[in-house]
């Protein structure tokens, strides 16, 4: 599958780069790479319409932008040249197979660079990874919704979860997650291709959902049905300015807000379910 690469340069990087990631994610762009001058964003060629980016002219802090088609076979080369190790404090090192350095973090996860969201470079994946270390998820049933590369599902297994469902609607992400799960010798993760409808009849102790705001809001009803009573729901993929909308909507389905953590204006919300 071919992708469109949108290359944006900014007059001032922050907070405009983060704002544009959220803006483009709402339009269907699914992968992002930060550059020294701006942002590379990716969307499947079949899902792209030039009218989707017409409004970029209204962002005064954008210096210039351009787009091009990236052929399927060029993905690895595109990622490898931009993929640096990601360090989540002293807890986790997220590396690629071509990284040869030694790391002192407690855990290491190897991710084959591909065009799917969740390499650890994005602030929300970093936030989710850090929070999983703070929870006791040993022997728990975990859902990683919108799994992307599978990194959070892999981390959940390494932290002791015994049953993990990793779900993504994108076929490329589905295939990449399977590859990364095998690369990390994980045995307890079931990868599924589809939306929240594939979860009917299942129960989880912990749900991880690193998706954009509108999708999260549409999933609350499903999450309330499949999360065990007193189970934990972790949400990320949105700006801290969106927290009130999400907290208000979550409360309609029995979710109790517990805490918020932020990084570079991005947020992670933690809820418990009280049925």
Image: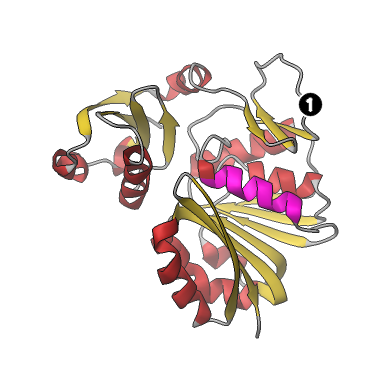
Q: Mark 1 Cα within 10 Å, few/some/many (few <14, many 20+)?
A: few
Q: What predominant SS class does the magenta segment belong to?
A: helix
Rendering quarter of residue 144: bottom right
Residue 131 in magenta stretch? yes
> Height in image: 139 above or below 122?
below
Total marks shown come to: 1
* Along the line of sight, the residue nearer the viewer: 241 or 128: 241
For image coordinates 67% across by 47% down, the residue present is 130
Left or right placement of residue 135 versus residue 242 in this view: right
* Along the line of sight, the residue nearer the viewer: 187 or 140: 140
Picture coordinates of residue 54, whole percent (x, y): 15, 42
Picture coordinates of residue 94, whole percent (x, y): 66, 31
Residue 239 in magenta stretch? no
Picture coordinates of residue 164, whole percent (x, y): 73, 55
Q: Which residues are magenta?
A: 124-134
Q: Disc 1 designates what residue?
A: 104
Left or right placement of residue 197 versus residue 2 in this view: right
> Height in image: 142 above or below 60?
below
> Height in image: 183 above or below 199?
above
- Image quadrant occupied by the C terminus: bottom right
* Along the line of sight, the residue nearer the viewer: 256 or 108: 256
For image coordinates 58% across by 71% down, the residue present is 223
For image coordinates 66% across by 82% down, the residue present is 274
Left or right placement of residue 236 versus residue 184 in this view: left
Picture coordinates of residue 87, whole percent (x, y): 65, 32
Does residue 48 show up? yes
């Amino acid at each position: 599958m071919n992708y469109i690469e949108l290359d944006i340069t900014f007059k001032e990087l922050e907070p405009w780069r983060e704002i544009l990631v959220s803006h483009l994610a709402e339009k269907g762009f699914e992968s992002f790479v930060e550059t020294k001058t701006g942002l590379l964003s990716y969307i499947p060629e079949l899902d792209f319409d030039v009218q989707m980016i017409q409004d970029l002219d209204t962002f005064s802090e954008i210096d210039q932008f351009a787009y091009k088609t990236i052929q399927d076979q060029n993905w690895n080369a595109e990622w490898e040249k931009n993929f640096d190790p990601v360090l989540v404090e002293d807890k986790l090192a997220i590396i690629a197979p071509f990284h040869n350095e030694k790391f002192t973090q407690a855990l290491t996860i190897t991710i084959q660079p591909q065009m799917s969201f969740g390499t650890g470079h994005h602030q929300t994946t970093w936030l989710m990874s850090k929070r999983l270390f703070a929870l006791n998820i040993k022997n728990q049933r975990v859902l990683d919704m919108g799994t992307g590369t599978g990194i959070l599902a892999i981390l959940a297994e390494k932290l002791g979860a015994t049953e993990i469902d990793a779900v993504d609607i994108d076929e490329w992400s589905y295939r990449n997650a399977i590859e990364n799960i095998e690369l990390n010798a994980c045995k307890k993760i079931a990868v599924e291709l589809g939306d929240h409808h594939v979860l009917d009849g299942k129960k989880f102790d912990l749900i991880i959902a690193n998706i954009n705001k509108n999708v999260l809001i549409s999933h609350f009803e499903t999450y309330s049905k499949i999360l065990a009573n007193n189970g934990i729901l972790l949400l990320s993929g949105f700006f801290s300015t969106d927290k009130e909308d999400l907290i208000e909507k979550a409360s309609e389905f029995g979710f109790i807000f517990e805490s918020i953590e932020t990084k570079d204006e991005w947020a992670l919300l933690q809820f418990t379910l009280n049925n």
